[in-house]
């Protein structure tokens, strides 16, 4: 059976784009790897954060609607997004959170790893997990967060569901996830078989009210496949299971199909190719508004409607 090999990206909703940029690039130290627009509604930014080159598995993206109200946390949604940080970096992060006046919970043990959790400016729950399997080359030289502490990649997500059964069955039988134990009400599943390249915890909360999606809500989770052929295999397999994936959509930096898991969370399957250097060199990633060819003729109108962004000034750092 085919199995999902890990997270490609996670996409969430936000309100003020500048505040979002200041938090994810300025505070967490991710690189803004692409400024573009929502291809389906080009009067809204689509901001992509990731590592130096925007590798799949490091990408967190946002649609910031400047006046959006906060969403309500509840059942049937992704209730937390976790990043890996190097073992031993928590003192740095605790000090950084405290200096910024951001309240946090933890460190607390979870399946043998230490976790800290806090909210982003729109109320999305962000978690940092100490991870021994980190990649020493992760992060990027221009980050305000130095390398021994830098965010490595997306570690996984937490779903809040009233019951875990339907989603669990779908993850294991439909997508090839491996069950990896239960702690209290938390049930863990690993993407594929090769370790933690994307995990899902389902927290069962029978009393949770239904979630309401708006700023601070996760919109969807994208899982990675290496190319178009593999994506079509998944489309076929999902149809056979009675799940109705969409047509393939061209997202410029990858191609995508979408479907819902039984608990209500929107999933995407996205290709690793062609990647983020398709329309600007790696050195210049995120420095200028990029539009796909079909929106380029409307550039001046689109740009006029978008609030201007003050980009972070990359830290001067010795080349690695
Ligand atoms: Zn997506």
Image (cartoon, rainbow, N blue to C red):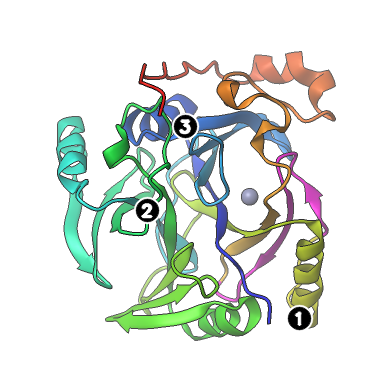
Comparing marks 1 and 2, which lies closer to the viewer?
Answer: 2
Based on the picture, tell me whether residue 111 belongs to the magenta stretch: no
Looking at the image, tell me whether mark 1 or mark 3 is earlier in sequence order: 3
User: Which residue of the protein is positioned furthest toward the front in this rendering?
Assistant: 320
**Image check: 235 left or right of 77?**
right
Q: Position of residue 60 (x, y in %)?
A: 50, 45
Quote the CA–CA distance across marks 1 and 3: 39 Å
The residue at which mark 2 appears reads as: 134
In this rendering, position of residue 233 left or right of residue 63: right
The residues tagged by marks 2 and 3 sit, at their Cα atoms, a distance apart of 18 Å
Camera sees residue 220: no
- For disc 1, the marked residue is 242
In the rendered view, would you say 235 is above or below 83?
below
Residue 67 got which mark?
none
Q: Is residue 123 above or below residue 281?
A: below
Q: What element carries label 1?
A: loop
């Amino acid at each position: 059976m085919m199995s999902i090999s890990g997270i490609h990206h996670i996409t969430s909703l936000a309100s003020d784009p500048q505040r979002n940029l200041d938090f994810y690039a300025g505070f967490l130290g991710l690189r803004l790897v692409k400024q573009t627009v929502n291809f389906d509604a080009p009067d809204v930014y689509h901001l992509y954060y990731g590592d130096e080159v925007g590798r799949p598995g490091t990408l967190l993206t946002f649609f910031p609607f400047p006046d959006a109200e906060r969403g309500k946390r509840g059942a049937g949604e992704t209730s937390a997004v976790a990043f890996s940080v190097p073992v031993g970096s928590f003192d740095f992060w605790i000090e950084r959170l405290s200096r910024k006046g951001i309240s946090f919970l933890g460190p607390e043990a979870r399946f043998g790893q230490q976790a800290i959790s806090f909210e982003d400016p729109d109320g999305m729950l962000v978690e940092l997990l100490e991870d021994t399997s980190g990649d020493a080359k992760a992060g990027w030289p221009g980050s305000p967060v130095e390398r021994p502490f830098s965010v490595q990649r997306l570690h996984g997500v937490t779903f809040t569901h009233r019951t875990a059964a339907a989603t669990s069955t779908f993850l294991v039988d439909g997508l090839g996830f491996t069950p990896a134990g239960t702690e209290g009400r938390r049930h863990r599943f690993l993407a594929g078989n090769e370790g933690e390249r994307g995990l899902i915890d389902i927290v069962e909360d029978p009393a949770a009210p239904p979630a309401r999606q708006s700023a601070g809500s996760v919109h969807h989770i994208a899982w990675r496949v290496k190319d178009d052929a593999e994506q079509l295999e998944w489309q076929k397999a999902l149809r056979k299971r009675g799940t109705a994936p969409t047509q393939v959509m061209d997202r410029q930096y990858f191609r995508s199909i979408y479907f819902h898991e039984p608990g209500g969370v929107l999933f995407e399957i996205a290709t690793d190719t062609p990647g983020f250097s398709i329309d600007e060199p790696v050195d210049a990633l995120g420095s200028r508004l990029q539009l796909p060819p079909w929106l380029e003729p409307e550039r001046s109108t689109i740009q006029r409607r978008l609030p201007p962004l003050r980009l972070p000034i990359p830290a001067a750092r010795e080349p690695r």
